[in-house]
Image: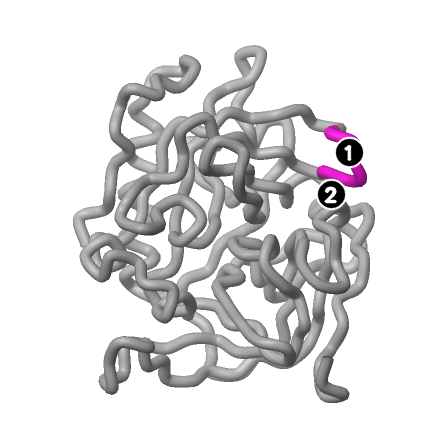
Amino acid sequence: MSPAARAAQPLVGGLAASTVGVLVVDGGRHQCSASVVASRSRRLLATAAHCVWLDDAWQVDGAVFIPGYASGEEPFGRWPVQTAWVPKAWQAARSPIDDVAAETDVAFVSLAPVDGRLAEEVLGAQGIRFFTPDRLTVAALGYPAIGAYDGQSLQACTGAARTEDFVGGSSTQVAGQVLVMTCDMTEGASGGPWLTGPDPASGRGQVIGVVSGGNDTDLLSPKFGAAAEDLYNTADTAASQSQNTAPDQSQTPLASSR
């Protein structure tokens, strides 16, 4: 690890202990991170698009969210994924791994009720914000599972984030903007929230991005803007209209109109 890298630290307690968790996808073969975000439907997660749509296919068959996971303990149980929404631009790009961290690498996921209760009723929720300054202080959270990390505990990096232009690996054209901060979290943290303004007492903040990619020293997030807000509104409206039933895995998840 480069001396410039900031090592993540374990995070225990506060609202993060119930709103952030492991997102198990692709039939249990892959692990990402996700967070409950405030919504009218009271059942939405924010995560990375590559966690739910990769290699030109959905990865949510049998997917579950495990909030507050810690060393095998599941204090809030498992919440089945109903469906997911990703930008059509992410699908059209066929999600090449070189484009992880593009501004389109964001997804919203709806959760089925458990014992008749919606996720936000039981777990609480982080706020969400779609327009941010070019520089700000954030806390990036997730469950890194490679290298120095084992995916068994929630980790966090806190520090300054800056805005940079993003150029995908398959193009020389600027493909939007991303947020960058110094942090060494690895695979498994993908989809974890970037929080601004977390209250020291409650741990509640506003999600302004999600872990998308990085290297030995830097962590990247799509910079939320109008496209992310449209995607969130599409997901929230559809989730509000859905029945309070367990997910029908025969149904194809919906993509956004953008």
- Secondary structure, mark 2, is helix
Horizontal side of 155 relative to 182 (left or right) equals right
- Placement of the N terminus among the 4 image quadrants: bottom right
- Compared to residue 48, the image places residue 97 above or below, namely below
Residue 126 lies, in percent from the top left, at 58, 48
Q: Give, as a three-letter code, the residue at label 1.
A: Gly
Of residue 106 and residue 128, the one placed in the foreground of this image is: 106
Query: Which mark's residue is nearer the viewer, 1 or 2?
Result: 1
The question of residue 254 being in magenta is answered with: no
Colour scheme of this structure image? one colour
Residue 12 lies, in percent from the top left, at 82, 49
Residue 257 lies, in percent from the top left, at 17, 48
- Compared to residue 133, the image places residue 233 above or below, namely above
- Secondary structure, mark 1, is loop
Horizontal side of 210 relative to 102 (left or right) equals right
Q: CA distance from mark 1 to mark 2?
A: 14 Å
Of residue 39 and residue 87, the one placed in the foreground of this image is: 87
- Marking on residue 17: 2
Residue 40 lies, in percent from the top left, at 41, 35
- Placement of the C terminus among the 4 image quadrants: bottom left
- The magenta region covers 69-74
Q: Which residue is mark 1?
A: 72
Q: Give, as a three-letter code, the residue at label 2.
A: Ala
Q: Crowdedness of circle 1 by 10 Å Cα count: few (<14), some, many (20+)?
A: few
- Compared to residue 135, the image places residue 251 above or below, namely above
Query: Main structural element of the magenta stretch: helix, strand or loop?
Result: loop
Sequence order check: which comes first, mark 1 or mark 2?
A: 2
